[in-house]
Amino acid sequence: MKDETLEQVERLHEREGMFAWRETYVHMLEWEHGRVQQALTRAVNTMEPSVADKKDCSNAALFDPEFGQWHFVSFTDL
């Protein structure tokens, strides 16, 4: 992954207050299959899909697997 891309991912998480996102993802590697499946199921079941032209999109959606909730972060100033 390019450094610039990783910096953008980091800024997205941190702008939403998800400062420990790297640690969360590392810990997920140690989760039992059932816990991973539960987080995935929660993410999919709580999505609100829609159809839009990507030029009209102004936010990124980040899922917090520990708390089971979505966060929406503006693309502004990335």
Image: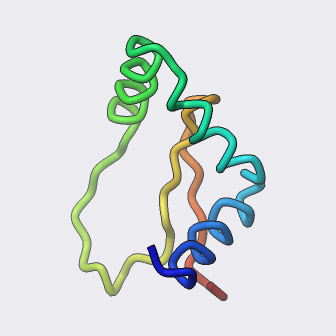
Q: Residue at x 59, y 51 (%)?
A: 71
* Front one among 12 and 21: 21
Residue 24 picture location, percent across and down: 64, 38
Q: Quadrant of residue 73?
A: bottom right
Name the residue nearer the viewer: 27 or 12.
27
Q: Residue at x 56, y 79 (%)?
A: 75
Applied colour scheme? rainbow
Q: Residue at x 36, y 20 (%)?
A: 37
10 up-or-down from 17: above or below: below
Look at the image and tell me in which quarter the N terminus lies. bottom left
Q: Which image quadrant is residue 44 in?
A: top left
Rendering coords of residue 12 (x, y %): 62, 67
Q: How many marks?
A: 0
Q: Nearer the viewer, residue 33 or 38?
A: 33
Residue depicted at 46% across the width and 14% down the height:
32
Residue 78 sits above or below residue 67 on the image = below
Left or right: residue 46 versus residue 53 is right
Q: Position of 58 compared to 64: left or right?
A: left
Q: Quadrant of the C terminus?
A: bottom right
Is 67 on the left or on the right of 61, as rendered?
Answer: right
Give the percent coordinates (x, y) of residue 39: 45, 26
* Residue 14 vs residue 56, the one in the foreground: 14
